[in-house]
């Protein structure tokens, strides 16, 4: 189907977009932490993918290529958001208030997990989201991030330790149980 779009059958891209829209949305939502931003990001990512489809080479999987576009787009948004927050704190520190949607999202997600995720670098958070929430293999992640699978595996171990330590210090939870979410899911 990808080749037919590259060969001029642009109508087929609707089927491609439809099949990848939800997985890319989940990825963006988890990386960005905001549903509205994720919805906007998915639209931008699909447009970028369509415009760049001529550059796609079948030697890598299409989903890896698409996630790479999503990764770069989301990381740029997060950098921009961080810069905007910094500027806003400088000029209007007392007027920043959470929107109703942000307040609801804060209640739906574990505060200690969010704290742990906030302490990760953008690269670490991206690796965690790809591995845990998107359930990609290290080989697939390697294609997206241009990092060897072995290096990703080692980084993932460090990220797991960092998240566990943050959650343990925040909640006083012991992660020694073999059935814990962190040891089985990550």
Image: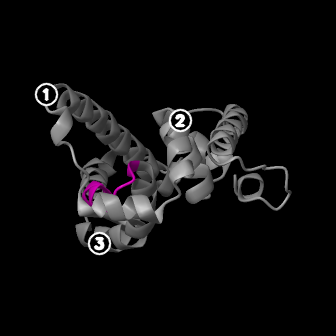
Q: Is residue 10 magenta?
A: no
Image quadrant where one finds the N terminus: bottom left
Q: Is residue 36 magenta?
A: yes
Foreground mark, 1 or 3, reads 1
Distance Cα–Cα, label 2 vs label 3: 36 Å
118 vs 78, nearest the viewer: 118
Q: Which quarter of the figure has residue 28?
A: bottom left
Q: Which comes before the other along the chain, label 1 or label 2?
A: 1
Residue at horizontal 37%, vertical 67%?
21
Q: For the residue carrying disc 2, how many other residues have a C-alpha within 10 Å: few (<14), some (14-19), or many (20+)?
A: some
Give x and y (percent) for residue 60. 53, 48
* Badge 3 element: helix
Q: For the residue carrying disc 1, how many other residues have a C-alpha within 10 Å: few (<14), some (14-19), or many (20+)?
A: few
Q: Which comes before the other along the chain, label 1 or label 3?
A: 3
Q: Is residue 94 visible?
A: yes
Distance Cα–Cα, label 1 vs label 3: 44 Å
Residue at horizontal 29%, vertical 54%?
41
Residue at horizontal 66%, vertical 36%?
162
Residue at horizontal 32%, vertical 37%?
76
* Badge 1 element: helix
Q: Is residue 126 visible?
A: no
Q: Which residues are magenta?
A: 32-42
> Do the residues bearing badges 1 and 3 touch, measured as CB atoms within 8 Å?
no
| Residue under pointer 3 | 14
| Residue under pointer 1 | 91
Q: For the residue carrying disc 3, how many other residues have a C-alpha within 10 Å: few (<14), some (14-19), or many (20+)?
A: few
């Amino acid at each position: 189907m990808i080749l037919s779009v590259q060969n001029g059958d642009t109508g087929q891209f609707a089927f491609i977009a439809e099949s990848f829209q939800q997985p890319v949305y989940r990825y963006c939502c988890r990386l960005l932490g905001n549903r509205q931003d994720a919805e906007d990001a998915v639209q931008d990512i699909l447009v970028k993918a369509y415009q760049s489809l001529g550059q796609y080479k079948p030697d890598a999987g299409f989903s890896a290529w698409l996630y790479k576009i999503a990764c770069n787009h989301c990381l740029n948004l997060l950098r921009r958001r961080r810069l905007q927050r910094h500027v806003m704190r400088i000029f209007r520190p007392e007027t920043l208030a959470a929107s109703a949607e942000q307040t609801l999202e804060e209640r739906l997600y574990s505060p200690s997990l969010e704290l742990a995720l906030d302490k990760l670098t953008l690269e670490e958070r991206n690796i965690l989201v790809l591995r845990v929430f998107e359930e990609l293999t290290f080989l697939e992640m390697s294609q997206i991030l241009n990092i060897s699978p072995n290096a990703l595996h080692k980084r993932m171990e460090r990220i797991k330790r960092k998240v566990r330590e943050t959650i343990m210090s925040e909640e006083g939870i012991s992660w020694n149980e073999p059935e814990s979410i962190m040891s089985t899911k990550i």
